[in-house]
Image: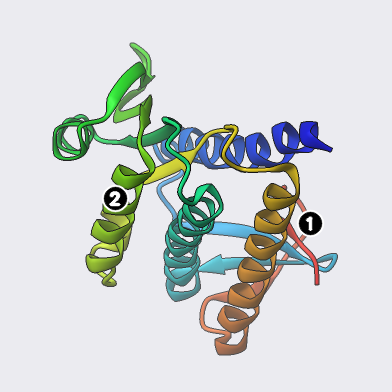
Amino acid sequence: MRNLQFIIVPGIIIGIIGGIILFFVAYNYYPQKNVNINLNGNCYEFLDGAYQKYQDLVSIRERELLKMQIAAIGESHILVPITFSGSSVNVDRIIDDFDINVTDIQTLGDENIRVDKMIVKGVVSNEILEQILKNISENNTDSSLDSMPKIGILPNSGISASESANISNNIDQFMTKGIKEIMLDKNGVKETGCRSTMIYND
């Protein structure tokens, strides 16, 4: 059962990092803002107001995920491996503000695609993670959601397999509930063909 942690948590983190990379690369070619959602086998496209609400929901999901993972680690004194992303300026600020021990930095894009985004790996104490969460929560406004640091906790001995499974289930429920609320408004929501890898089920 312990190995289940190394399936569930990496899946969440890979989704976060993969989504970041795909978003910034695709945005260079497709400036129209939209997202395709598969909910219980029915597919919808979120545009305009619905798209912005979905982006806000994703940002809040990342905060809630961080909160659950910090709670699971609890009083453990281990150094927690993390990953986060942002512009070069924001990355430098986060590293300086929270005394993060950086182990790896990846710059997105290449000579053909210029993107001022970086993905960083490092280790921090749980105390620092709580400070980061507090900072994110205190700056949780509509205008600041897009600029929130995208921080994820990587697999570690402080989170058990059962805790990882529970966190994953709670996050799925959170997203499904939020998507349904967006659809109730119907502003910017339209039915479309199923081509999304973002699949949510009750």
Indicate left or right for 164 with 40 as reference. Answer: left
Q: Indicate the position of residue 192 as horizontal and vertical percent values.
A: 73, 65
Q: Indicate the position of residue 188 as horizontal and vertical percent values.
A: 52, 76
Residue extending farthest to the bottom is 185
Q: Residue at x 45, y 72 (%)?
A: 53
What sort of colour scheme is used for the picture?
rainbow
Residue ID for mark 2: 132
Q: Residue at x 58, y 75 (%)?
A: 178
Secondary structure state at the residue bearing disc 2: helix
Indicate left or right for 19 with 200 as reference. Answer: left
Label 1 packing within 10 angstroms: few (<14), some (14-19), many (20+) = some
Label 2 packing within 10 angstroms: few (<14), some (14-19), many (20+) = some
Q: Indicate the position of residue 23 as horizontal and vertical percent values.
A: 47, 41
* Quadrant in which residue 46 is drawn: bottom right
* Quadrant in which residue 14 is drawn: top right
Q: Residue at x 21, y 39 (%)?
A: 98
Q: Residue at x 26, y 30 (%)?
A: 100
Say which amino acid is labelled 2.
Ile
Indicate left or right for 126 with 175 as reference. Answer: left
In space, the residues marked 1 and 2 are separated at their CA atoms by 37 Å
Q: Pick the quarter of the image with the C terminus.
A: bottom right
Say which amino acid is labelled 1.
Cys
